[in-house]
Structures are given as structure tokens and as C-alpha cells.
Amino acid sequence: MSLIKCPKCQNVVSDRATKCPHCRTTLKIAVHSYCEECGAELAPDDKTCQVCGFPVYNNIVPRKSSGGWKTVLLSCILSVILSLLTSIFAIFLFINGVVKNNGGESFLKSIGIDSSIITWDLNSEKKSKDKDDAKPKAPEKTEFFMGEIAEYNGVQLSISDFYISGGNEWASPPDGYVFLYLNMSATNNSEKEILISSLSSFEAYCDDHKIDNGLDASIAGSADGKQELDGYIAPGKKMDGYIGLVVPSNWGKIELYYKDNVWLESNFKFTINHKQE
């Protein structure tokens, strides 16, 4: 870019300006030629570039961006850095192989270098997988019946029996329904305190229809002096209580699912058939 004089007011303006900022005269943008090789500006009658000697073929080309050599230099620097990183990684792999295969840990230790800093355990992925495999898993058996003990993640649960009630003066079931109380026992064999909730730890179904833990059943059970299966259990301790449900009087099968986390799927279930009464 260069400066020219406005043909009307003679003030200096840019040769790229389309209008004079002083007198508002419309200007014709000058067309410039540049050397295809070095980007230097060419005179109209130049046959060769006055800077690099490159022949001119009267073709107008855009000016090469200034600082082209800087781009080349930056590319060279990046190439060198990449080569150095590749070499360092190759040396690292070589040392790792030598140390692992030839017992070099003792040598490194003798000169005060921790071998774990420069060696890479190729079995780390397998160890990580083994660690994941060690996490608590749901029991292979997922269905239990009365008298059986189900265990998950250090927590044992069992249903000893059940009984049916028509309620009392404090609460009674709707017509055609009864209160069903499942007598349960919970044992905490883990190393931390756990919470058992009759509302959030269990999900009940009666003859394949979902049912909610009955509030009226809880009221009637509490009035009779019975304890629900609710509360914290310290490590190594037990708790007994009941789960109260409101079910049709002609119910056939109850499925009670247990889950140690309200947001996760159930871990196992208890099945109670009416014929067990």
C-alpha cells in the first residue's frame, strides 16, 4: 500500500481509498502488480523483478503476506520440537524395556533414581481392570424366598414370615384390601454405617402391579407397638422390623425389590407367595 494525491484537492490519501476523506471525491483504486516469487511491488514496465530477478509475465497477483520467512522459521522450529519429542519417547521406551527385562530396577535404585519415574508398567491396564472387577457386584442369585438370606455389598437381608391384619382403631385398609406386614431382619457386615429405609430401599409389586408402602399400614403397625425397618445400622450390628403394605385381600404373590441406592436399579428381590401362609 502507498500514498497518492487526490486529483481534486491534492491532499495525500491511500491508494486503496475509494473516496477522498477530505473532499469526498470518488477515487479509482490503483491496480498493483507483485512479484510471484518474493512479493515485491512491480513497476508497470518491469520485465523482471528488481529485487529477486524473477521474470514478469504481466500477470497481476496479490501481494504475499509479509513475514513469509517467519512462517517458514516457525515451521522449522515446530518440526525440530516434534523430532525431539519423538526421540525422547523412543529413548523412554528403550529404557523401560531394558529395566523391565534385565532387572535394572536395582541398578537405578543404587544410584538414587526411582524406577517408577521412568518405567511404564505395561500391565497397568490389566491392573485397572482387575481393580474394577474387585468392586461389589450383585449376587449371582437375584431371587430369594422366605427364610433365605440375601447379601449384597456386606448387607444381609431376610424375611422370616408375614402376617395379615385388618387394621385397628387408628387405621384400617379400604374395602377389599388388607394390611400385609413382612417381618424382616437386616445385618450390616460392612465397615461403614448404612441406612435402611422402608420407603426408599424397597420397591413392591403385588401380582405384577406396583404398590406403594402403605402409610395407613405403618400407622396401624406403630399403634400395635411394632417397629418398622427404618434407621441406621452400625458396622457389625443388626436391626429387625417390618415392611407394611396395603394389598388386595385375594393377593397371590408379592415381589419386594431391594436397592442400596435409590437412583440405581434393584440388587435382588424377595418373592412371597400367599400359599406360604
Image (cartoon, grey):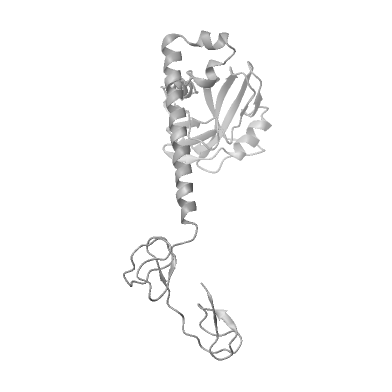
The residue under the point 63% across, 29% down is 230
The residue under the point 44% across, 29% down is 87
Where is residue 239? Give x, y as percent. Answer: 63, 21
Q: Is residue 143 above or below residue 168?
A: above
Mark yes or no: residue 125 visible.
no
The residue under the point 46% across, 38% down is 80
Where is residue 68? Give x, y as percent. Answer: 46, 56
Q: Is residue 60 above or below residue 87?
A: below
Depth check, front residue: 90 or 64 = 64
The residue under the point 53% across, 12% down is 108
Mark yes or no: residue 17 visible.
yes
Left/right placement of residue 269 relative to residue 165 reads: left
**Furthest residue in direction bottom, as rendered:** 8
Depth check, front residue: 48 or 114 = 48
Where is residue 93? Give x, y as percent. Answer: 43, 23
Depth check, front residue: 188 or 24 = 24
Tally of numbered tags: 0
**Furthest residue in direction left, as rendered:** 57
Where is residue 123? Give x, y as percent. Answer: 43, 20
